[in-house]
Image: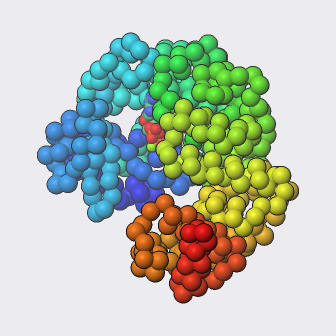
Amino acid sequence: LPKEFQDALPILETIEAAGYEAYFVGGSVRDTLLGKPIHDVDIATSAFPAEIKSLFNKTVDTGIEHGTVMILDHGTGYETTTFRTESDYTDFRRPDSVSFVRSLSEDLKRRDFTVNALALTASGEVIDHFGGLDDLDNHVLRAVGEPSERFHEDALRMMRAVRFAAQLNFEIESNTQQAILDHAALLANISIERINVEFTKLLQAPAATYGILEMLKGHLNAYMSGLASSDIDLIGLAELEETAQPQDDAQAWTLLVFELGLTPDDAGIFLRNWKHSKDLIKTVQTSITLLNALRLGEVSDWELYQAGPAIQTALAVVALSELPIDGQALQVRYQALPIHSRAELAITGGDLAKNLQQKPGPLFGKILNQLEHEVVLKQIANLNSALVYRAIELMGKEKK
Ligand code: ATP
Ligand code: MG
């Protein structure tokens, strides 16, 4: 067993010693069997949340209404979820109710794909009720049970299918694939935030090209904001992803927006529809602005300065999309800028108030902007004395 599981063994043992069952489940079991590194270890147990809480000193109710309690142990958190079944999905998402049960097999039945429905015992034995081990060997992604039923229950699973296909480079089994095509429209019932999580993971997956093509084959994009139209070049994105694997969310979405040819303003609307954070939207818009400028020719030091930290994202996309641009040289130029933010300017509003003997107002902003420009463009040194002198000069001009 990998170290992450070894470390968690005392937790399984404590639960078992109290007379309950406990297993490792989910992605960590799947990834271990594939020989991949794992991040978080999930535990499923027959103990009810209150029973788990009474067995451990430190727990956090991370999702107690779904039966999930986090056990804190030597600085590591273990999500521990009571075996459960889900019933009556009247709106194609989330069950109307979850019932806690005492049987592992009921719990494994509600899981999405056979390779995600494996359990591992403390002694290292794999429990496989749905042929997940064979599917792992054969690199097949297959729904647990009847795929149509499973997608009716929770339409997000269709997005998860293409996401896992892309991450694992597994072929989607034909009945599962057909059910996606038949039920793509159910995705309209799923919140964009949940779709976003899966799609963002897909875009950064090793086999993203394959995942995007499967997504298109299943017509899932018809229910994805801004990606429905046939004019949209997702094939181009798929091709690009063949050689390019974005390394973070901002890179992934910049690459997408760049490939779609959106202006920074349209990118803003698109990304807001996808409910992205303000930070991500700003990074993408700034990167796109810089990329467009680069495509048209040389960019000025001022443009580089304005791109700020987003320049890293833009440069990553330059590399990924193999634009004929010398990213290295740009990086060097950026590093060599005298300052990288307004905060580094060697003069403050306070200095202006003191030296110009004026109350702060719009004029101060104007003068500071001008000084910032001149420092970035190396027209003046970033020294307090030089900047104060220049500020007085600019003030004189304003007064005229
Ligand atoms: P990752 O490595 O991305 O975390 P994962 O397989 O652990 O992959 P999670 O989203 O963390 O995926 O979910 C953990 C487990 O919970 C899954 O392996 C699966 O068994 C189950 N699961 C999660 N979401 C669903 C869902 N929508 N329907 C059915 N089962 C699900
Ligand atoms: Mg997980």
Using the rendered image of the protein, determine whether residue 136 is visible from the camera's viewpoint: no
Colour setup of the view: rainbow
Figure disc tally: 0
Residue 309 to residue 296: above or below: below
Q: Residue at x 79, y 36 (%)?
A: 236
Location of residue 156 in the rendering, given as x and y in whole percent from the top left corner: 50, 26
Position of residue 223 measured from the top left corner of the image (x, y, whole percent): 59, 22
Q: Is residue 323 left or right of residue 279?
A: right
Residue 121 or residue 249, whichever sits in front: 249
Q: Nearer the viewer, residue 244 or 125?
A: 244
* Quarter holding residue 153: top left
Q: Residue furthest front?
A: 400
Q: Residue 142 or 77: which is nearer the viewer?
A: 77
State the image coordinates of residue 375 (x, y, percent, origin top left): 64, 75
Residue pictured at 21% horizontal, 38% vertical: 49
Give the position of the C terminus as an image quadrant.
Answer: bottom right
For the question of whether residue 223 can be seen, the reply is yes
**Would you say 35 lies left or right of 189 here?**
right
Residue 340: image location, x then y, percent? 59, 70
Q: Tell which residue pokes out farthest to the bottom in this image.
A: 385
Q: Quadrant of residue 143?
A: top right
Q: In front here: 133 or 115?
A: 115
Q: Is residue 102 above or below residue 299?
A: above
Residue 65 position (above or below residue 391):
above
Image quarter where the N terminus lies is bottom left
The part of the image, by quadrant, that contains residue 104 is top left
The structure residue drawn at horizontal position 16% and vertical position 40%, both measured from the top left corner, is 51
Residue for point 55% across, 73% down: 395
In the image, taking residue 82 as reference, residue 138 lies left or right, namely: right
